[in-house]
Amino acid sequence: MLTASERVQAAEQVTAELDSALRAVGVTLPSLCVDPVSAASTFMAPLVELGRCNVETARRLAEVLAEYAQGAAYGHDGHGPEGRQR
């Protein structure tokens, strides 16, 4: 079982990883952070606050997720269900 400090460290690490991954595809969530209230709690795990963003950022995030979903449906080799190719 993780200590409170280790839980906060894990939340900070995954927040940084998420920020890096999003920035790599052109998405910046300006309010991305570890939620301080949940981080201070001894009863719950720290939460990652995704925050608010402008319409342009939301649109870019939606585009990236849609592109990923389409690629995932066909797999990395370009073949989809029943071996069909894109």
Image (tube, rainbow, N blue to C red):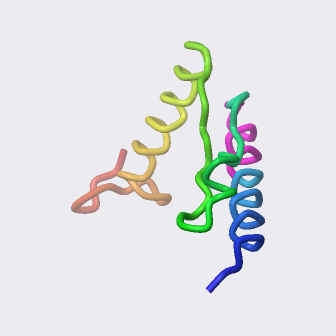
Q: Main secondary structure of the magenta part?
A: helix
| Relative image position of residue 77 (x, y in whole percent) | 47, 60
Q: Residue at x 77, y 51 (%)?
A: 16
Vertical comparison of 75 with 2: above or below: above
Would you say 57 lies left or right of 63 here?
Answer: right
Vertical comparison of 18 with 10: above or below: above
Pick whichever, 82 or 22, lies toward us: 22
User: Which image quarter holds the N terminus?
Assistant: bottom right
In the rendered image, which quarter is residue 9 located in?
Answer: bottom right
In the rendered image, which quarter is residue 81 located in?
Answer: bottom left
Would you say 9 lies left or right of 58 here?
Answer: right
In the rendered image, which quarter is residue 56 located in?
Answer: top right
Q: Residue at x 42, y 53 (%)?
A: 72
Q: Residue at x 68, y 40 (%)?
A: 22
| Relative image position of residue 35 (x, y in whole percent) | 65, 46
Residues in magenta?
Answer: 18-28
* Residue occupying the far left of the picture: 82
What count of labels does the image hold? 0
Vertical comparison of 30 with 44: above or below: above
Q: Residue at x 36, y 44 (%)?
A: 86
| Relative image position of residue 3 (x, y in whole percent) | 71, 79
* Residue occupying the far top of the picture: 55
